[in-house]
Every structure is written in C-alpha cells, then in structure tokens.
C-alpha cells in the first residue's frame, strides 16, 4: 500500500470554507448517493474473514462452500512490480466492475476481473 496515490493539490490555495447549511447539503447529497449506490448493488452476502487478529491471538476461519459456490468473479490487483494479489470475489460482473472502478480510482493501477470456473 506504499504506492497509493492521493488526490492532493500541487498548488497551495486558500481552503474553501463551508457554512453549516452548505455542510448539511453536502452531507445529504453524499448520503443520497450512497443509498442509491447501495440499492443498485443489491443485497450483500456476508463473508467472514479468513483470519481475525486480536492483539497476539490469530483466529483462522473458513468460508462455507455454499457461499463460495455463489461467487462468479475474482478481482486481482496488479502492482507496478508485476505482482498479482487476489483482492475479493463477487457474485456478478456488475458488482465486480463497480468494485474494480473504485479501486482503480483510488490507486490508479490495473485491476483484472477474472471469471471463476463453475
């Protein structure tokens, strides 16, 4: 994660101040977009973490085969050094495309969407 690019202005400008009304409008717009995006994505399927780490204790967990059988696409991250790392799996192509576009926006590197074999 050391190579994450951030959206930082190269030129220093005076900060833009927002009053309470403007802040509420921006927050309402953000909440509206988040709800619309959540509705478009449909219901989420919870998948437990493979490893839970609490202080010095590591708890290994397994994902049930039934949940894995519903997954159809895998997102693979390609770093500048050519390394591959599986990021997540999704239940359909639309969700995979949405997730990949967000990852590319944040990081700028290549994300490969692979179809999982049935």
Image (cartoon, helix red, strand yellow):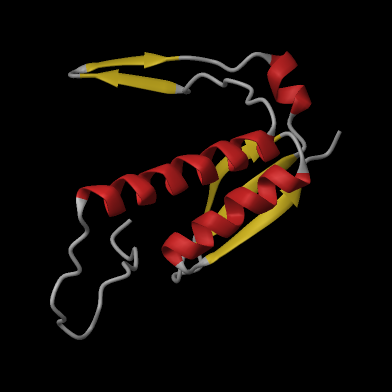
Q: Quadrant of the N terminus?
A: bottom left
Residue pictured at 78% horizontal, 41% vertical: 116
Q: Quadrant of residue 73?
A: top right
Left or right: where does residue 57 sit relative to residue 102?
A: left
Q: Quadrant of the C terminus?
A: top right
* Total residue callouts: 0
Q: Position of residue 44 (x, y in %)?
A: 63, 26
Left or right: where does residue 84 sit relative to residue 41?
A: left
User: Which residue is outermost to the front?
Assistant: 21
Q: Quadrant of residue 112?
A: bottom right
Residue pictured at 67% horizontal, 47% vertical: 96
Q: Position of residue 17 (x, y in %)?
A: 17, 63
Residue pictured at 13% horizontal, 77% vertical: 14
Q: Nearer the viewer, residue 84 or 10?
A: 10
Q: Position of residue 67 (x, y in %)?
A: 70, 19
Q: In the picture shown, does residue 51 fall above or below 19?
A: above
Q: Nearer the viewer, residue 34 or 18?
A: 18
Q: In the picture shown, does residue 31 fall above or below 65?
A: below
User: Which residue is outermost to the bottom?
Assistant: 11
Q: Position of residue 68 (x, y in %)?
A: 70, 24
Q: Nearer the viewer, residue 31 or 63?
A: 31
Q: In the picture shown, does residue 97 fall above or below 17?
A: above
Residue pictured at 25% horizontal, 78% vertical: 9
């Amino acid at each position: 994660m050391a190579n994450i690019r951030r959206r930082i202005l190269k030129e220093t400008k005076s900060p833009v101040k927002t009053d309470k009304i403007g802040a509420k409008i921006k927050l309402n717009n953000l909440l509206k977009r988040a709800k619309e995006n959540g509705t478009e994505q449909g219901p989420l399927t919870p998948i437990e973490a493979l490893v839970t780490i609490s202080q010095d204790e590591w708890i290994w967990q397994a994902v049930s085969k039934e949940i894995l059988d519903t997954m159809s696409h895998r997102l693979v991250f390609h770093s500048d050094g050519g390394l591959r790392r599986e990021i997540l799996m999704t239940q359909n192509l639309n969700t995979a495309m949405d997730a990949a576009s967000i990852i590319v926006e944040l990081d700028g590197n290549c994300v490969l969407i692979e179809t999982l074999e049935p």
